[in-house]
Amino acid sequence: MRDEFRADLQIVSQLLVDMAEGVRAAMRQATRALLTADRQSAETVIERDAEIDDLYRHIEERVCDLLARQAPVASDLRAMITALHVAADLERMGDLAEHVAKTALRRHPSPAVPAELRSVFTEMSEIADRMAVKIGSVLAKPDADLAGELDGDDDAMDELHKNLFAVLLGDDWPYGVETAIDATLLGRFYERFADHAVNAGEHVVYLITGENSPTSTN
Amino acid sequence: MRDEFRADLQIVSQLLVDMAEGVRAAMRQATRALLTADRQSAETVIERDAEIDDLYRHIEERVCDLLARQAPVASDLRAMITALHVAADLERMGDLAEHVAKTALRRHPSPAVPAELRSVFTEMSEIADRMAVKIGSVLAKPDADLAGELDGDDDAMDELHKNLFAVLLGDDWPYGVETAIDATLLGRFYERFADHAVNAGEHVVYLITGENSPTSTN
């Protein structure tokens, strides 16, 4: 029974890793769509979000099946609940990548992001990518130190988010309200992506250490 | 054991109802803060978000305890997983009310919302309130028809969200980029509040009917 549980848990972990990889790929491709006005990339992200949703459903079914068959307690039960939380965060990260792609598509063939904002969105996307990689790594091999790095990444994301607003609110912002609205929403999508990554990381840390049960980030 | 499970489930349901009421009160008070530049209301929402977070943690602990002690299967297990989902949605709805309150506070003593947008935000808040009431009702007494009404409410919210952008992007928008950014984010907070309400409702319907397992909304 114990071996069976371990094997099942291993399958759930692998599904979570697959999900993290899918989410990372989605945000990379959505960013490409955004920064190069690449319609094909945008459409691919939107189409493939269903695969991430399917993984989420699959994980949830597996976990429910495991709870019903094996009735785990203590740390095994905690691992199951953690898997549900992390899967929910990853599912939402996939949605946020999709939102970025949809914004790119809505403005296509014009770029949704003007020249002045390319560098800040490039940096935001690099941080988002780094965070998605770390989530995948700590899911594959629990590592509280690596998961803890996500807080610093999130601080860097917040700083970029502030820089973005400084550009939008500068006296010399030449692009008007529509572009500012797009940039505001895009900024929020990257920032929320980072929040969910932090949240997923906190759940993994909780699983490893048993300390500081997380609620979701603001 | 069965009676004990029923009693425990009843406690979890009551905690969810309490959470829905707390979330409703938070969004009402946040809206008051927003539309009347009422600092005290804004601060109260921000302070009291911790109570909603505590309820969330409390529900999660109860559910984990129940899973460990009673090892429910089939519909009982589904009820437990549903409770976790609904609690997560409600927790996030509380955060969104807090974001509205923080936006009001950031502009205080100026109003964050100019005269032209008061009616759209008033209507958005009325729909949000109606949805929060319905969630509380279906949690207190499962009712798939009432839960199904949330889709229509969400459509109305989406329509208002479009109207909001139409005002912001009108040729005669006189308030500049900063006010447009605030309005964009506020619109998103109300719209996401509605999305989470729909999501929570879908989980309740799934629990009642066993059909159409939901993933989160976009």
Image (cartoon, coloured by chain):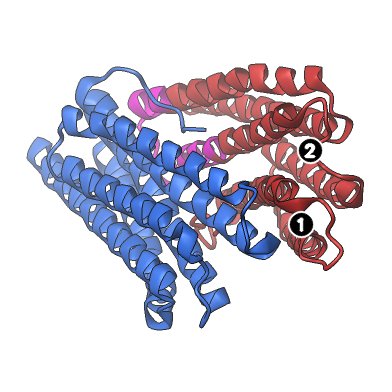
Chain colours: A red, B blue
Element assignment for label 2: loop
| Residue to which mark 2 is pinned | A112
Is residue B11 at least partly visible in the picture?
yes
Please tell me which residue is depicted at 35% across the width and 48% down the height of the picture.
B87
Mark 1: amino acid = Met
Residue name at image x 46 percent, y 69 percent:
B101
Residue B195 image-quadrant placement: top left
Q: Is residue A154 above or below residue B89?
A: below
Left or right of A116: which side holds A89? Answer: left
Give the structural element (helix, strand or loop) at label 1: helix
Between A153 and B9, the one lying in front of the other is A153
Distance CA(mark 2)–CA(mark 1) = 20 Å
Which residue is tagged 1?
A: A157
In the figure, is residue B204 to the left or right of A144? left
| Residue B46 found in image quarter | bottom left
Query: What is the span of residues highlighted in magenta in the rendered image?
Result: A64-88
In the depicted structure, whether residue A65 falls above or below residue B17: above
